[in-house]
Image (cartoon, rainbow, N blue to C red):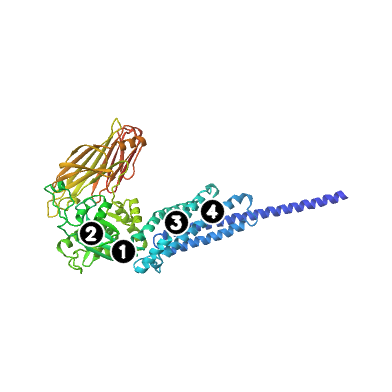
Amino acid sequence: MEDELFDSRSGIMRGVLVIILLIVIAAGVLYGYRTWKRFGLVNKMVIDVQTHLTNASQDFLPENFFNAKMELQSAAKILDDTRDILASISVLGAVPFTEDRYHIAVQFSEAAHSYIDTGIQLAELVEHISESAITQDGTISFAEVTPAQRAIILERTVQSIPAFNGIRAKLALLARQLSSINDESLDEPYRLMKYDLLKKSGFIEYSLGQIIPFLEVVPRFLGYADDKTYLILFQDVRRVRGTGGLITLYGIMRVKDGSISDFKVSNPDADPRLASALPAYAQSTDLAVIHSSFLQDTNWEFDFPAVAQQMIERYRTVKGEGKIDGVIAVDHDFFISLLRFIGPIRVRNTIFSADSFTQELDFHRGYGAYRTLNPPIQPNDPIADLVGTMIDSVNKMPFSGIFDVVKVVEARLHEKHILLWFDDPKLQEFSLSNNWTGHTRRKETDYVMVVDSNITDKDTDSYIERAIGYELTQDSLERLNAKLDIVYRNNSTITENTGHYATWLRIVIPRGSEVFAAQGFEGDIHRENRGEVTVVSGIVPVRSFQKAAVRLEYRLPITVAKAVQEKRRYDLLVQRQPGSKQSLTVSLFFQKPLTRFTKGGFFASPTHGQKAQEATGVKFVSDVRVDREFMAQF
C-alpha cells in the first residue's frame, strides 16, 4: 500500500516537474522571442540614427548649423531609447545565445552616443562663436555684422581653441575604441554605422587639424587683439621681377578686430634721389630701360622676406611713417581668380570681370577714365574701391561660399600669386611652414631655381614661353653632373607696350657647385655665393618672334653626392619664381637600377630599361606652377 502511495506521489511530482519544465521552456521561448524582437527594434533604430547622421553631415559645415544640431539631437534621443530597450533585455539577464550580442550592442551604443555628443558639442561651439552672424533661418552671414560683433567673434574664436583641440582628441580616442569592436560580432546595421561614424569623424578630425592652426593665427592677422598695419604691393607680372612683377601700386591697410579701418593706395612715383638697385652689367645691354622709383627697385631680388624688410625701410625713409607689421604682395591673377569665382563686380561706372580685369585696369590707368574723389596725390586707379567691393561681396556670401573663397586664396598662396611677410613671429612661422613667404628654400639636396627679371620698359612677359630642361647624370665615380637648358620664345609683336625682350637671368644652385660651361648669355656670366646657394647670372636678350637658348653645365657639390650614396636616394627641389610661367622636363640617370621614384602630380616614366626594376633612369614632365619636388630611390 505504501509502495503504491509512493509511486502515486512520485508520478504527481514528475508531472509537476514536467509542467514546471514546460513552463520554463515556454517562458524561455517567449523571452527569447521578445529579446530577438527587441534586438530587431534596436537594429531598426540604429538605421534611423544613421539617417540623422547623414542629414547632419550634409548640413553641418556648409551653412545650416541649426539643422545639423537638431539632427544630432534626434540621433541622441534615439540612442537614449535604445539604451532603455537594451536595459530591459538585461533585466533577467540575456539568454546564453544572445549574451555576446547584447554586450556588443551596449558597447556600440555607448560609443555611438559619445560620438554624437561630441558632434553636438562641436555644433554648439561653432554656434557660440558665430552667434552674431547667424540669421533667423539658421544660416551664417557676415553681411550685417558690425565691427563690435566682429571683435566678439574673433575673441570667442581665440578662447575656443582649447575646446576645439579637446574635441579633436576625443574623436581620435573614440575612433580607437570603435575600431576595436570586432566586425564579426556586429549585426549588419551596426557594421554600416561603424564605418560611417569612423569615416565622418575621421574627416572632422582631419579638418580640425587643418583649421585649428588657422584659428591660432587668423585673429592675429585680422588685428585681434592688437591692430595691424600692412604694406600692400600690387605686382604686374607682365613685367616680371624677382618677387613676381613690376610694382605698379602700393597701399597701406590698417586692420582692427577683423575690420579694415583704413586703406589708401598710392603710386610708387619715381624718386631721382634713389639709384637703381640693378647691377651695372644688367643695365649695359641696349634693350635695358630702367625707371627708378623708391619701391620698384626693391624687388629685383627673389628672396621675399629680405625684400619685404628692405621695402619697409625704404618706405619709412621716403614717407616718414613708422609702424608696419607686414608686407603682402599680390598680382593680377589673384584678382582674376576671385572675380572668376565671385562674378563680375561693378565699381561706379565700370564692370570688372575675370576676362576684362587687366584691360579695364590698363584703360583707366592710361586714359584717366576712372574718376575718384581722392586728392590729386592719390592715383587715378580703381583698385582700392575694387578691393572694398570684393570684400563686401564675400561678406554677403553664405558660409559655404566663404569656405570656397578661402580655398581659392589658399591655392593662390601655394602658387605664389600672394606673398607674405610678417613682423609677428607667430604669423611668420605659420607662413613659412606653409611655404607662403617666397623664401629661398635651400635643402641638403639638389636644388634649382630659375629667376627672370624683365629689364626693358615693355610688358612682354605674358608673351614669353620658357621651357626648362634639367638633366642629371651620375658618373662611374658616383659624382653628380648637371646640365640645365632654358629656351625662351618671344611671341610678342612690336607695339607701344610689347616687343623685344631682355631678362636678367639668375640661376640658383647648391653652394659649392662647380660650373663647367655657360652658353647663351650676352657678355660674361657672374657668379656669387649667397648663404647656402650659388647664383649664376647674366643677360639674355630675346628679340620679337625669335628664340634664345641658355645652357649651364656644372657638377654638384661633393656633400650632395655623398648624401645620395649614403641614403641611396636622390631628391631634387625646383623652386618656382612668382609670376614666371615655366614648363619643366627633368631627366635623371644613375649607376644603379631604381626601386622607386616619384609619380604623383606629373608625368613620369622609367628610362634605360624595359622593366621597372631594371631602369637606371627616370624622366619627369611637369611645370613650375608650384614648387616641384622629385625623388628617385635605388
Amino acid type, mark 3:
Asn
Looking at the image, the residue that sits furthest to the top is: 476
Residue position for label 1: 255
Question: Which residue is depicted at the point 54% across and 51% down?
Answer: 187
Q: Position of residue 137 (x, y in %)?
A: 40, 68
Mark number displayed over residue 165: 3
Question: Which residue is depicted at the point 62% across and 49% down?
Answer: 97
Tell me the SS state at disc 1.
strand
Tell me the SS state at disc 2.
helix
Q: Are marks 3 and 1 in contact (CB under 8 Å)?
A: no
Amino acid type, mark 4:
Phe
Mark number displayed over residue 315: 2
Q: Is residue 148 rendered to the left or right of residue 21? A: left
Mark number displayed over residue 145: none
Quick one: quadrant of the C terminus?
top left
Q: Position of residue 610 (x, y in %)?
A: 32, 33
The answer to which quarter of the image holds residue 598 is: top left
